[in-house]
Amino acid sequence: MKKSVWLAILLIVLGCGTVVLALAMKDFDFTALEGKTYETRSYEITDAFAGVVIEANTADVRVVPTDAAVATVTCREEKNLKHTVTVSENKLLIQLDDTRKWYEHIVFFSFGGPEVTVALPRVAFEALLIENDTGDIEILRDLSFKELYISTSTGDVACHAAVTDTARIETDTGDIEMKNTTLGALWVTGNTGEITLEDVSVVGRAEITVDTGDVQLSSLTCHTLVVKSDTGDVELDRVLAADTLSLESDTGDVELKRCDAAVIVIKTDTGDVEGTVCTDKHFVASSNTGDVRVPQYTTGGPCTITTDTGDIELSVVKN
């Protein structure tokens, strides 16, 4: 074996040994290798407020209920990347104050990060607005807001709070999850992340728009549901719309399991359409090159399915 190969192996062994030694000196605390120092600060909010505004960046944001009479904000943050916490114009404001030097923005790896936890009393608030970049966002149950707006880039969003008016959630690559909640109206926009709704009741309109991310909806009730997808699959399980169910996909497949609406409209390009509905429908289905198998009922609400090359197979299951 050539000397250069032996030298390369020796360097690798020495490098691994150095890493293990460094970890041992830090009691195998991986976060210590980042070279960052974190500190935790807590704030008790004694001033009254009706809305909450959180403007973060990389911090994970958690909004949780508390039995206490006042709200508290707990921030785990870097020395030069702190959050200011104030009450102004009837709003609780949590904003990032970034005083880092340019070279402090360079990060080669990270084993942890900043966190912001907001504990709110179990009363109804006017609004919750969260703007984030890479941090995850989690809103727990037993919280209620009139309006909800969440915007993030790569961070995931998990929302279980009730919203009496409109909930709007926008992400790029992050996943969106909503479970066990009631909403007045819902607008969701995503790109590559998955959209998951389970045991959700929407009084009015629910509209979901994604690019390549999959959409999975189960035990959902609403007045009107509109789903628009490009390449992502759309899967609906026990979804009931009082008025209209409109599903549109390009190359993604569409699957229904015991779903229903007064009017059903499904349109795809190459995606297949299959599944079951709960009541008789007047099916009008067409595909340029795909197979079509639907019941030949003449009564019931309209169910129109159109594809280009996709197959269509729907049936009625009443029990």
Image (spheres, rainbow, N blue to C red):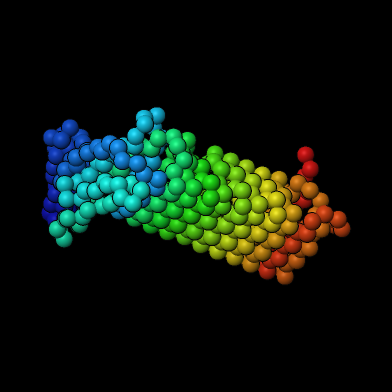
Q: Position of residue 104 (x, y in %)?
A: 16, 55
Q: Is residue 125 left or right of residue 224?
A: left
Q: Position of residue 162 (x, y in %)?
A: 51, 42
Which residue is rendered at x = 79% and y = 56% of the image?
301
Q: Is residue 125 above or below residue 305?
A: above
Q: Decide if residue 44 is in sight here.
A: yes
Quarter of the figure with the C terminus: top right
Residue at 54%, 39% in the rendered image: 180
Query: In this rendering, would 256 be left or right of 278?
Result: left
Where does the image place residue 164, in percent across and percent down from the top left? 53, 46
Residue farthest toward the top in the current orientation of the protein: 67
Question: Going by the image, does 79 lie left or right of 166?
Answer: left
Badge count: 0
Which image quadrant for residue 27?
top left
Q: Is residue 311 visible?
A: no
Give the residue drawn at x 17%, y 37%. Answer: 23
Farthest residue, direction right? 298
30 left or right of 235 in image: left
Q: Quadrant of residue 152?
A: bottom left
Q: Nearer the viewer, residue 94 or 175?
A: 94
- Percent x, y of residue 300: 82, 54
Q: Looking at the image, which residue is at 13% across and 35% down?
A: 25
